[in-house]
Structures are given as C-alpha cells and as structure tokens.
Image (cartoon, grey):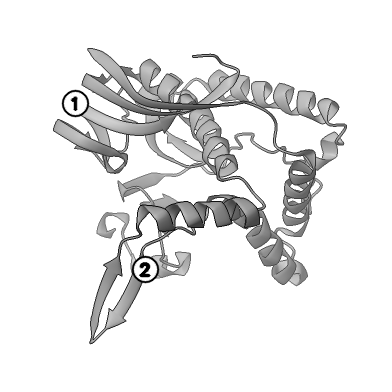
Amino acid sequence: MSKNFAYLLTVKFYNIKSKYYNNFISLSKCKNVINCNYDNGRIINADEIEITITDVDFYFILESYKYEKYEIIESYSSIYDYLPKQFIEFTLQKYVNKTQFKGIEEKQVEYAKEKNKFNSLYGMSVTNMIKDEVIFENGEWSEIPLENEEIISKLNDEEEKGFLSFAYGVWVTAHARNNLLKNVLLLDKYVIYCDTDSIKLKKGYNQNIISNYNDFVKKKINHVSKLFNIPIEKFAPKDKKGVSHMLGLFELDEHYDKFITQGAKKYAYEIDGKIGITVAGVPKSRCKCIKKIRRF
C-alpha cells in the first residue's frame, strides 16, 4: 500500500484485541462477527470480524489493536489530492461568518443560517440517493429492494447530476476521526469520554500532548494557506471579543466538578452546583428536571 493512494478496503481480522483501555471499532460497522466482547458499542476483542474501512481507519486499527492476522478481501484505490480550492474557500467563508455571528444577540438568525450551511457541506457530499422503494399500503409499511440494473442506472444518474464527491465526506471525516483518536491513544487512561470533536479528561493528563497536536495543526494550516494563496485569517477568524479561533485546534471548554455518562451522546455534568446535560434529541433546557446529577 502506498501513502499516495486512498484505499477502500474490506478486511477480515482474526483474534483481534484492543491494546488500550479505550476501544475503537464499532460493532455496528462489522459483519460476520464471532465471539465478540464489546463496551458501549465498541469491540474489545473478537475471534473474527469483517469490516469495510478506509486506509486511514486501517492504519489506525493496526496501531491500536493486537491481532493474529488479517486478510484483505477487497481493495479499491484512488490518488490522494486536496479538495478543490473553490470548495475550500466556500467552506472557510461559512466558518468565518459563523464565528463572527456567534454570541451576538441581534445576529442569532444569521448565525443559525451560516451554521446550517457550514454543517450541510458534509451532508450534501454523503447523501445516499440510491435507496429501496418504501411503500405504505393497507396500514402496512414494506420495502421493494432495488434490482442490480436499477442500482447501476441510479449510479449513472448520480454521476451526471452530483456536484460533490461521496469520497469527500468519507475521507475528510476519516482523517478528522483519526486526528481525535490519535490523541485518545496518547491520553488513554485519562480519557473518560470522547465525541466527534472533543475529549473529556481526568486531572493529571499531560497537557503537552494537546499543545503538540495544536502546533501540528497550525503547521499544516500555514502550509495549505501558502499553497493555495488563501489568507490565514480565513482559517482563524475572530469572534465578537476579538479572539481568534483557528480551525481544528483543541480549546479548553470547561472544568466539570462532576460528570456522569450513560454512553455516547448521553451525559450530564455539574459546574459550581449547576447541572447541564447533553443528550441527542433533547433540548439542553431539560436539565431543569434533574436536581441531583445521580438522578441522570
């Protein structure tokens, strides 16, 4: 495998086991799983799994798990390159707008619009238009699976109509996930929770790990800024207080006095006696229902 190529791989691993306190392979993404132990949906160990992954995920699994052997069942490759400059500039402008409007009372509507546009760039690249037909008849739902000819026809239509590549969304998020989880490996025993863009840590962790990662991001952004002749201010816009927020850096969010979680996207915390919650699909204001954090 060449580092100049992006790969899409289907791999079978035998006698695989995580080397860390944290576990990283999603059980829901695997098939043909034999004798598996898992925690919060992530595989601790298994006799056998089969998974379809990018080259980024593959290298990360080799680093974070022990295994007897692996077998690459399918492999597809493409040359790595940067996203189109026009798309990069558009993305950065949405980030600039969102940052400038954040926290300004009279700009709440503008902030919401810019944030939606910024977030939708990912969704537009990975929307799956090729789906089975769903029918509701006589009070019953049913699906009619697509035939191969229909799938090929729809793929051809997508190739003509599509304006973003599905691969953009897949590989950008693969790299983002890899950036986050490489820090989880380094901070392993201090990590009590992590999400798509955050890590929650116990006291005593090595702060140099975060500083070194941020320096690495700054170097990469400065390189791309010069390469594409895009002003560095586009990557690091200022908020209403004049504070610069460079894209991709870890920022210290809060010090929690207490923290409790029931798994991914389900946690509560206490700061100076006040309780807050983050639960997927539940407004943050619902924290008023909880008087003691243990009731979560």
Where the C terminus falls, by quadrant?
A: bottom left
Q: Which mark is residue 48?
A: 1
Query: Is 41 on the left or on the right of 242, as rendered?
Result: left
Between tags 2 and 1, which lies in front? 2
- The amino acid type found where label 2 is placed reads Glu
Q: Secondary structure at mark 2?
A: strand
Three-letter code, disc 1: Glu
Callout 1: few (<14), some (14-19), or many (20+) C-alpha neighbours within 10 Å?
many
Q: Residue furthest front?
A: 149
Q: Which residue is mark 2?
A: 133
Residue closer to the observer: 174 or 195: 174
Looking at the image, residue 21 sits to the left or right of residue 204; the answer is: left
* Left or right placement of residue 225 versus residue 91 in this view: right
Q: Residues within 10 Å of mark 2 (few under 14, many from 20)?
A: few
The numbered dot on residue 78 is none
* Most foreground residue, 227 or 78: 78
Q: Which badge, 2 or 1, is on the more N-terminal residue?
A: 1
Asked where in the image residue 212 lies, by quadrant, the reply is: top right
Name the residue at 64% across, 57% down.
161
Residue located at (71% from left, 24% from top): 220
